[in-house]
Amino acid sequence: MSRITSLSRRIASISESMTIAISSRAKALKAEGADIIDFGLGEPDFDTPQHIKLAAIEAINQGCTKYTPAAGTPQLRQAVAEKFKKDNGLKYDPAQIFLSCGAKHSLFNIILACCEEGDEVIIPTPYWLSYPEMVKAAGAECVFLPTSEENQFKISPDQLANALTPRSRMLIMNSPSNPTGSVYNASELAALAAVVADHPAVLVLSDEIYEALVYDGVKHVSIASMPGMFERTVVVNGFSKAYAMTGWRLGYAAGHAEIIKAAIRLQSHATSGPCTISQAAGLAALTGDQTCVEEMRAEFDRRRRYIVEGLNAINGITCVEPKGAFYALPNVSSFYGREIKGRKVSGSMDFAQLCLEKAKIAVVPGCAFGDDSVIRLSYATSLDNIRRGLARLADMLP
């Protein structure tokens, strides 16, 4: 590659999002006429609730189509502050909050604002696949803490204590988790917070985008609510999962005022404020009737129980029951080293390709999340698709 076309070292090290790549491949095959059942992308299959759409239309009709402040509209920042107080017991001033073009954008801004060369960022595995790439973009280094089915995919205080060093700058927490569906309870978070307390330079970045999607009476708790953690935590959330607003691209973050100011400065040069129309819709989402959220959660719960039972009924597959989000993470490693339908299966990538080619189902290989023993299936699709997909998977396997 010539010098004029060479890429920066940081960008050259970043991988493409595998979930988006697999979903794109599935859509391309569908366009060619293939009957593909897509378990790949983490996107609710529900439409955005009507009152939210109407608020956006009204904003357009009223001419609310201009730039907003880089941090978002004052009305929506205030509404987010009230949401944190009501739902999480966290008292933020609106100046401690900024709106962005999705929760992913908020995470990226915070990581870039706080991390640099020489810093270490601790990430439990399996992880959401964009965390390591964001850390690489900041020039920092990832320190992975492996978890397993046996411990419900949760890190322990001892693991965390052993991983922390003088170079540690950030711990990324994701509860409820993508891809594992694990949810940390208050006592587990308190134990982790006690470890962090001994390392004053460490910031916790808490991704809580799946907060509304918890099951079996489980309660979402933010680590920011633990003793001593309010000033040490940046909480990230958004509208895409709870309100089926993925394409609206609207998220938010809250934390220490100086960190938030730095993220806003960065955003002011990158994107400016998020879409004005989306912010009007977001305001309606937070302040309007929340029945729609519960209806979607209940349907996800029904699908969750069905897909986990179906996966565990397939010989050779085990699947921990997720307590949050909308993903199942079955262990398929018992099939590795075998030939299935004429293809040698050596790992999760081979298994995922086998599923797409032979069973016409799109799944995400666990290697994308740092765990090659599993695959991820999103149950943010219809129960009929889940039934047909599980039947195809069972028929494909020996």
Image (tube, rainbow, N blue to C red):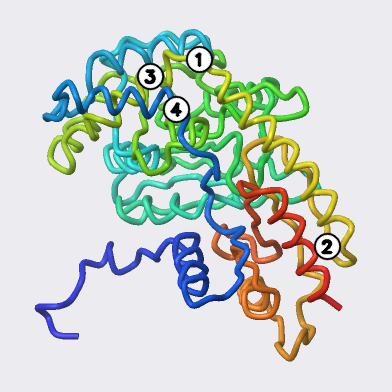
**Quarter-of-image position of residue 103:** top left
| Residue 104 vertical position relative to residue 297 in the rendered view, above or below | below
Does residue 272 lie above or below 222 as drawn? below
Do the residues under discs 4 and 1 have CB atoms within 8 angstroms? no
Q: Residues within 10 Å of mark 2 (few under 14, many from 20)?
A: some
* Residue position for label 4: 50
Residue 8, numbered label: none
Q: Name the residue beneath numbered marker 1.
A: 289
At label 2, which amino acid type do we have?
A: Ile
Residue mark closest to the camera, 3 vs 4:
4
Q: CA distance from mark 2 to mark 4?
A: 40 Å
Query: Measured from the top left, where is residue 239 in percent x and y?
Result: 43, 31
- Name the residue that disc number 3 marks: 284
Callout 2 secondary element: loop
Question: For the residue labelled by badge 4, is the local secondary structure a helix, a strand or a loop?
Answer: helix
Q: Nearer the viewer, residue 28 or 240?
A: 28
Would you say the residues marked 1 and 3 are in contact, meaning their CB atoms lie under 8 Å apart? no
